[in-house]
Amino acid sequence: MTSVNTPALPARAERMSQHRRRQMSDRAISQLFIWPTLILLILMNIFPLFYSLYLSFNDYSVIANEPAEWVALENYQEILANQRSRYWHNFIVTGRYAVLSVGLQIVIGFGLAMLLREKFRGSGLITTLILIPMMLSPVVVGLFWKLIFDPSKGIFNYLIYLDPRAGDQWLSNPTLGLWSIVIVDVWMWSPFVMLLVLSGLSAIPDYLYEAAAIDRASAWFQFRRITLPQVMPLLLIAVLFRTIEAFKAFDVVMGLTGGGPGDTTETVAVRLYSEAFLGKFNTGESSALAYIVLIIIIAISNLYIRALNRAREG
Amino acid sequence: MLKKSRSLLVLIAILMAMVIAPVSAAPAERQVTELKIFWAQWPPADYLQEIGNRYEAETGIKVTVIQEPWGSFYDKMSVEWAAQGDAYDMVVGDSQWLGQGAEQGHYVELTDFMVENDIIDTVTPATLKYYGEFPANSGRYWAYPTEGEAVGWAYRKDRFEDPEEMAAFEEQYGYPLAPPETFEQLRDIAEFFYRPDENVYGVGVYTQKDYDGMIMGYENVMFSWGVDWQDADNQVIGVVNSDRAVEALEFYKELYSFAPPGTNNAFYTEMNSVFVNGQATMVMNYFAFLPDLLNAEKNPYADVTGFFSGPTGPYGDRYVALGGQGMSVLNYISDERKQASLDFIKWFASDDVQQQWADVGGYTCNIGVLESEEFLSNTPYNRAFAESMTFVKDFWNIPVYGELLEPAQRYINAYVVGDVGTAKEALDGMAVEQHEILVDAGVIEE
């Protein structure tokens, strides 16, 4: 037997060695998992990102059946320097909307969180009910608020005017139109701010308040020196998210006013849509506009993140 | 290690190729067994499917009408054009698309086909001009007029025929209350029935800002005031902002002042809504949306709903805004599919199929059918429709129509709905912007 088996040993060892070689290393397996994802990411995100950047320097319409024509910074110049193009108006509308909307959401969201901070009978149910608006589709919200604002059948005018039918038509009023969008956005997203602030409030240790109480600190002092600084990082995160969203405001605006009357409520996102689609298909110019919005959002985010870091350090 | 990575990449590439290959390598086209027609999602598309089923029964070639909601109809078609895709054989496209379809090579030219088969003489001249011809008056055709469409008017017969209302109206305005024949009469009736305290309003008019709703409403007044979108040289300044245009816009704003509240961004859906909820005494709407007003399940006033076609303006002009679509063959399909599509259009354009098309509910553009007593008496609004199709007018249909539309929508909506500035300022602003767009597009010189 021995004489028979002895020559087979090196062959077996060789086979095992080959088998080991055929087995994939950890690195190979990790690459096998990573590459499909990376390829998808490159195809679906990275390539469109850079391609749209390239298009932003071209005169190009996606449906024109004509090649893109390099125009360097002309699209950016058209947006930022040509008064007739009205883009600054869209930025001003968006900025006004963002400031009003985010500001009110912070105040109302914070107030709601303070009210719901103490647990009481039914507080869980009330919190859940308050959170419902942010779970709804913005398009649906836009459509039913359109009915709410309707002076002849909506409840809004009944609540704020003695004679509802003689009251303003909010959605067709150039001044009140933007306010109506702000009201809807605040109604929908204040609960989001409330949720973040509530989580911040629940993380504040009780001993801080106990120590302050022993020192006979006033409620305002406790709020200013304990509550606000402790909640500030989460509040800034809420501001960051809501500001980014405000700059992208589209569905509620389209549902309520379509950007009208005229262009009084036309935000940058609505303008972007009308330039990129709706019979115009100015692909090059709309790509440039999208990049300008991206740069603004990145800049604002950086400011907030710096403030956030300072709040955390301080 | 480098070798391993390379072999891994090759493996991934092979796997991806295996996934992509079945998609890109379609089987060679031999015989056409199915025709796909792309159209917006609305009742006429269902009617076309019904006609298509008859074609299948006759020829064995299946016809599928692929419907897309109105909101994304143009976007989806544009994406298909951009990709030069062959997902559809034909499209029943908007009249404004003709310029793009023709100039950018998306549509097959149908001139020879329509002339050789005597199709051009079977449809009304106005529908052939606006649904099929590009450039205007060129004699070149790109679409077969399929769904005739225009803006008509619905009214509450019970209010119009109420003896007390009739007497009060006649006393106030000096002539009997009846469906208006002129826009001045329409204004008087709208004013008469404007009673916010009773939740009753005079007239509902289009105001939608997003796309073309505002213009589709204003055009009815503008054209009937003798105003066009351009003169013979395609100039707009002094045309769209002429004195008559100013009068027309002021008149449209006045009509809006008699509209139910909440119609500040209103199009066809909202028009029917304010009519069926009893608020509006009259509404404008495309004929394709009027059948709903005769449906007692949808409209409690169905049995007292009447219809009339667009009234005459103060200078004797009478026009209505054109809607509707023509059927075009897409250029990116195989020759076999193009021929099969042409065969379908030839069959569809025949008099007897057009009669069937009208019978199932389609708004035919066929002269013979439109004039037949059978068609005219088929529904309460067919007579008004047939009449309207002889005096329709449309917006620009050149490739930059979308750019021309935007300032028009913006300025007119701001003035009518938002009460911003004066009619003259709104039209001047619109004219200057449209002029610049036309210069940039090379349609006119500076």
Image (cartoon, coloured by chain):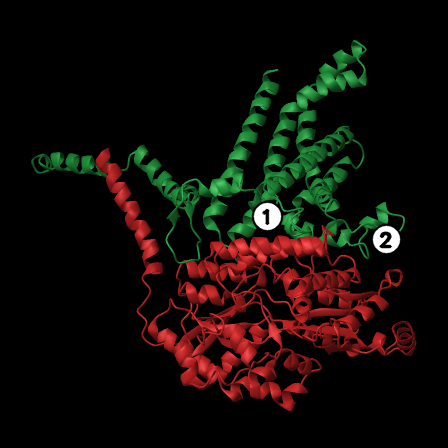
Chain colours: A green, B red
Disc 1 vs disc 2: Cβ atoms closer than 8 Å? Answer: no
The answer to which quarter of the image holds residue B28 is: bottom left
Image coordinates of residue B97 in percent, x first then y, are: 50, 65
Instruction: Classify mark 2: residues with Cα within 10 Å, few (<14), some (14-19) or many (20+).
Output: few
In the drawing, what numbered circle is on residue A231? none
Residue at the limit of the structure toward the bottom, as seen here: B373
User: Considering only vertical position in the picture, is B200 above or below B140?
Assistant: above
Query: What amino acid does circle 1 point to?
Result: Val
Q: Which quarter of the rendering shows the N terminus of chain B? A: top left
Q: Secondary structure at mark 1?
A: helix
User: Considering only vertical position in the picture, is B263 above or below B364?
Assistant: above
Image coordinates of residue B414 in percent, x first then y, are: 69, 52
Residue at the limit of the structure toward the top, as seen here: A215
For residue A6, side relative to residue A65 (left or right): left
User: Considering only vertical position in the picture, is B174 above or below A74?
Assistant: below
User: Considering only vertical position in the picture, is A205 above or below A48?
Assistant: above
In this rendered view, identify the residue nearer to me: B56 or A299: A299
Residue B221 visible? The answer is yes
Which residue occupies 57% across, 26% down?
A: A303
For residue A168, side relative to residue B117 (left or right): right
Task: Please tell me which of labels 1 and 2 falls first in the chain.
Answer: 2
What is the chain identity of the residue bearing mark 2? A
Query: What amino acid does circle 2 point to?
Result: Ala
What is the chain identity of the residue bearing mark 1? A
Which residue occupies 71% across, 82% down?
A: B380
Image coordinates of residue B104 in percent, x first then y, are: 41, 63
In this rendered view, identify the residue nearer to me: A203 or B309: B309
The residues tagged by marks 1 and 2 sit, at their Cα atoms, a distance apart of: 31 Å
Per the image, the residue denoted by label 2 is A166
Per the image, the residue denoted by label 1 is A270
For residue A81, side relative to residue A118 (left or right): left
